[in-house]
Image (spheres, helix red, strand yellow):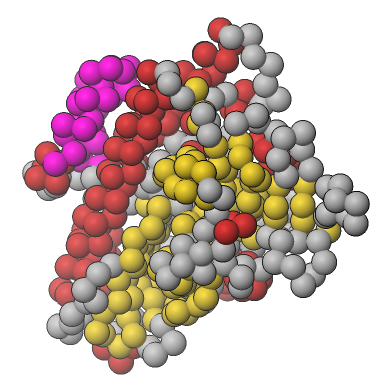
Amino acid sequence: MVTADGALRHGRVPAAMPVQLVLATPNVPVRVWTEDVDPQALEQLKRTAALPFVRHHVAAMPDVHLGIGATVGSVIATRGAIVPAAVGVDIGCGMMAVRTTLTAADLPDTLGRLRARIEAAVPVGLDQHDERHAPVQAAKRLDAGLRAILDRHPAIAPKGKERSRWVQQLGTLGGGNHFIEVCLDEDERVWAMLHSGSRGIGNRIGTYFIARARELAQAADAHLPDRDLAWLDEGSADYDDYLHAVGWAQDYASENRRQMMAAVLDAMRAELPAFRTDAMAIDCHHNYVARERHFGEELLVTRKGAIRAGAGELGIIPGSMGARSYIVRGKGQAESFCSCAHGAGRRMSRSEARRRFSRQDLAEQTRGVECRKDAGVIDEIPAAYKDIDAVMANQRDLVEVVHTLRQVLCVKG
């Protein structure tokens, strides 16, 4: 906290303030919107904030938790350099949601058939489209941008039969915490919502440039507190190439969500009464980088597990399987770099969740939701995540709730 003599200390901020913790570093402070954060994540945040090109402060959202490279739930503003591992390998991962004219009364008593139809329409986990069903026209719009990247960095390209994999994965879900859901809002209106990113090609781009930054740091004999904090300097070819590549991957991730949403809505039309959708879907990245102006400076803002919450901007904050999710409107809070949480945030690792919980626990915690309840998704059990309502309470200065959603169907990879 800031003491009377103006000195910055590591400690609690009075409860009336939205920022609950302030951490000191040799460079800039870390401002944390929760006290519910483990010590390892706090140390990781301080290492990031100590980098010389980080500007003003690092903002840590209330869903903050330990990550690879940078802390999940962190917002990092830089000038003159960028850390590829802070963006990560799931570049452009984010959410899309669409409200329909359907109501709860239009849904059948059991949603098993609808879930099966969605799972048949959208490849999940390691599956992908076959060549006949891949969205070739959408891929053609992205092809020139990818070719420009691969011409300069051919090592990114998948080899052999995997060469067309990025096309066949366009419009697919993936695994882990990615999902497709059908939800009901406070007026019993039906929503379709999904969470996914840039799939294998985004992973290859992220992995390549993370390794490239490490190579450059080693060649410069840089002594980093964490090798994942290796960066690319502005003015270098690698910096320019990375920003081009990460921008392309973010476009791919958005198109991936659009393709999936179209398939989900088609599946719903095949099983449910006729309906219309709102004119515009809500779409937001939460693993990405963007050029923005904050505190009078043009900066690169990396959001690792955080969404933009500019004044009046709509966003999506999902809870875990079986918990509530929220459609929110940003308040444009300057201290957060116009950002907010991207979800509930993990409370424990996947391995710990599998060790602590059983299939019976999963069934009980997802009662009333049509979803997988097998051992393969125990690591996604709601108890492995933070309480989404506590997360929302801790960011009431960042967003206002527009709609509250509850899941009735969930598809996972």
Residue bounds of the magenta highlight: 141-169
Which residue is more in the foreground, 285 or 180? 285
Give the image quarter of residue 128.
top left
At which x and y percent is residue 355? 66, 50
At which x and y percent is residue 72? 58, 47
- The residue at 30%/71% (across/down) is 98
Give the image quarter of residue 18.
bottom right
Does residue 194 appear left or right of residue 42 in this picture? left
Which residue is more in the foreground, 161 or 344? 344
User: Magenta residues: mostly which secondary structure?
Assistant: helix
**In the image as oriented, which residue stretches furthest toward the right?**
5
Does residue 261 appear left or right of residue 369 in this picture? left
Q: Looking at the rendering, in which quadrant would you find the N terminus?
A: bottom right
Does residue 98 appear left or right of residue 64 in this picture? left
Q: Check if residue 384 falls in the magenta segment.
A: no
Give the number of marks.
0
At which x and y percent is residue 96? 34, 62
Q: On screen, 107 above or below 85? A: below
- The residue at 38%/46% (across/down) is 92
Does residue 363 appear left or right of residue 282 in this picture? right
- The residue at 57%/59% (across/down) is 334
Q: On screen, 93 above or below 151? A: below
At which x and y percent is residue 165? 23, 34
- The residue at 33%/39% (across/down) is 247
